[in-house]
Image (spheres, rainbow, N blue to C red):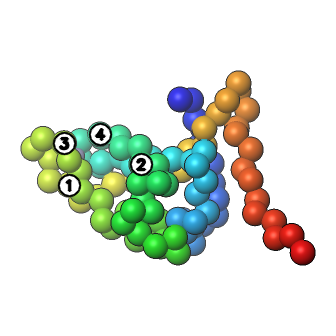
């Protein structure tokens, strides 16, 4: 599915709950360049919604055969439909 890079804030401040179902965390191993696309639903299984994404980065382990890297780069991408980003929904509390 096509996607484009987005910035939700400073890297040290973005938390898991800020990702929507239309987002994907793209991690790339710095040693072998293998790319991992991790969806928020997968992250919620192991992490609290208040976990900062830079902390999740520290749990990274490349699974490529023969690669023992624990270092990656990462960014967030948002799914694009018909050339436009899928709208981000805001939760609004009603009275
Ligand atoms: Zn690797």
- How far apart are the alpha carbons under marks 4 and 1? 11 Å
- How far apart are the alpha carbons under marks 2 and 3? 15 Å
Find numbered disc 3 in the image and state the secondary structure of the residue it sits on: loop
Instruction: For ligand 1, tell me if the residue under mark 3 lies within 8 Å.
Output: yes
Q: Assess disc 1: are there few (<14), some (14-19) or many (≥20) residues with their C-alpha within 10 Å of its C-alpha.
A: some
Q: Are marks 2 and 1 in contact (CB under 8 Å)?
A: no
Image coordinates of residue 55 in percent, x first then y, are: 40, 71
The residue that mark 1 highlights is: 69
For residue 95, above or below residue 82? below
- How far apart are the alpha carbons under marks 4 and 3? 7 Å
Task: Identify the residue shown where x is 73% and y is 32%.
Answer: 84
Name the front one of labels 2 and 3: 2
Location of residue 18 (image quadrant) = bottom right
The residue that mark 3 highlights is: 64
- How far apart are the alpha carbons under marks 2 and 1? 17 Å
As drawn, the residue found furthest toward the left would be 66
Q: Are marks 4 and 3 in contact (CB under 8 Å)?
A: yes
Instruction: For ligand 1, tell me if the residue under mark 4 lies within 8 Å.
Output: yes
Instruction: Point out the tag, 3 or 1, that comes first from the N-terminus.
Output: 3
The residue that mark 2 highlights is: 38
Tell me, for residue 34, which label it has, or none: 4
Q: Are marks 2 and 3 in contact (CB under 8 Å)?
A: no
Q: Assess disc 3: are there few (<14), some (14-19) or many (≥20) residues with their C-alpha within 10 Å of its C-alpha.
A: few
Task: Identify the residue shown where x is 14% and y is 53%.
Answer: 68
For residue 15, above or below residue 89? below
């Amino acid at each position: 599915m096509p996607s484009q890079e987005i910035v939700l804030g400073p890297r040290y401040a973005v938390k898991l709950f800020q990702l929507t179902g239309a987002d994907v965390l793209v991690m790339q191993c710095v040693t072998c360049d293998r790319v991992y696309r991790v969806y928020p639903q997968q992250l919620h299984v192991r992490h609290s919604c208040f976990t900062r994404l830079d902390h999740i980065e520290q749990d990274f382990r490349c699974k490529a055969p023969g690669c023992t890297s624990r270092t990656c780069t990462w960014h967030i991408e948002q799914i694009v439909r018909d050339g436009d980003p899928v709208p981000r929904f805001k939760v609004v509390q009603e009275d």
